[in-house]
Image (cartoon, rainbow, N blue to C red):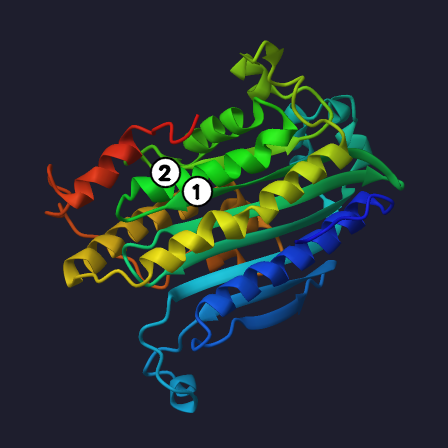
Amino acid sequence: MATLQSDKPMRQQVEEYISTLQEEIVAAFEALDPSAPKFKRDAWVRPQGGRGLSCVFAVPHPSSPAAAQQPAHTNTVLEKAGVNISIVHGSLPPAAVKQMRADHGSLKDLDVDEKGALPFFAAGISLVIHPRNPHAPTVHANYRYFEIADKGTVLAWWFGGGSDLTPSYLYESDAAHFHTTLRDAAASHGAALYPVLKKWCDEYFYIPHRGEARGIGGIFFDDLCDEDHKTFSAFGEVGGESADKGRPRSAEAILKMVKDLGNAFVPSYVPILKQRSSTPYTEAERRWQLLRRGRYVEFNLVYDRGTRFGLLTPGARIESVLMSLPEEARWEYMSDMGALGTREAEVQEVLQKPRVWVQ
């Protein structure tokens, strides 16, 4: 498993960890389907400062010249996938700093107009896996670290991230396995951690115009640092202790939490993918999968903060920002799929009324 060195600057620890975690995750997927094409490793440099590595899986379209240069791959476990890391730095404009002040007390007394743009550092890993089989769920995970500095002094820092599952067909055992693995990874970091992050995930990955969640949840958190956090405070007490007081607070403790959650990704998802990728499926089930992917696209382009931030950031690498989108999706006017009593309706019900999968 990926390890950390606590005697190094935080940004260096995060950079080393996400690089190692990326390698481990890509290796796990390549080992699962050894006859499939390897992930494409695409290293890039940001002109404004920083670098990244995008590891992307895709099978060339039959009409593509690349398809003629390699054997046909029509039955791969994955259809499209990306496991990306980015380590970037630059100047944060005053408007962006002002927007962040509401969540960070250390920035509230800062005269942004006088200071002008401030140096920032951001490092993170982001991944989305879209399997080919409709019975195998899509999964997303993201873990990131952010710093704002002034003349070499860190003014504010925080972590964010999470992991969530989006099935087209509901298998309760898969949902329980995914949530149990994440709960167990969070257990040593406070009794309130999993319940808070699970509720937060259900609320974040919601599509208001559809009245349903994007998937069956997982965990989600943002702006986590040593300051009091309104989301944890609003949750109340767990086991007689304030949720906000019982969580990790120092940068080192939060990074340890991120490490445990990040290392839980492969065991939380790969066993599910391995089991479901060989399930026989019909054209109708493939059609439903594409309809569900349409909802995935709607959330990512309309509501996801990370996607919107990336699209509005000067110099952003758009190929990486839109990596989360599936290769194919479908929209039907007044679709006849999802009628009561069908397998499709089962997942619809859960998306409209989130469940508690593990205690």
Extreme-top residue of the structure = 240
Horizontal side, residue 357 vs residue 115: left or right: left
User: Where is residue 110, by image quadrant?
Assistant: top right
The residue under label 2 is 216
Q: Is residue 104 above or below residue 5?
A: above
Residue 316 shows in the view: no
Picture coordinates of residue 65, whole percent (x, y): 40, 87
Picture coordinates of residue 169, whole percent (x, y): 26, 47
User: Where is residue 23, by image quadrant?
Assistant: bottom right
Q: Is residue 32 above or below residue 162?
A: below
Numbered mark located on residue 178 in the image: 1
Q: Secondary structure at mark 2?
A: loop
Name the amino acid type tagged 1. Answer: Phe
* Residue found 44% across the figure and 57% down from its top: 129
Q: Residues within 10 Å of mark 1 (few under 14, many from 20)?
A: many
Picture coordinates of residue 327, whole percent (x, y): 36, 64
User: Where is residue 207, by image quadrant?
Assistant: top left
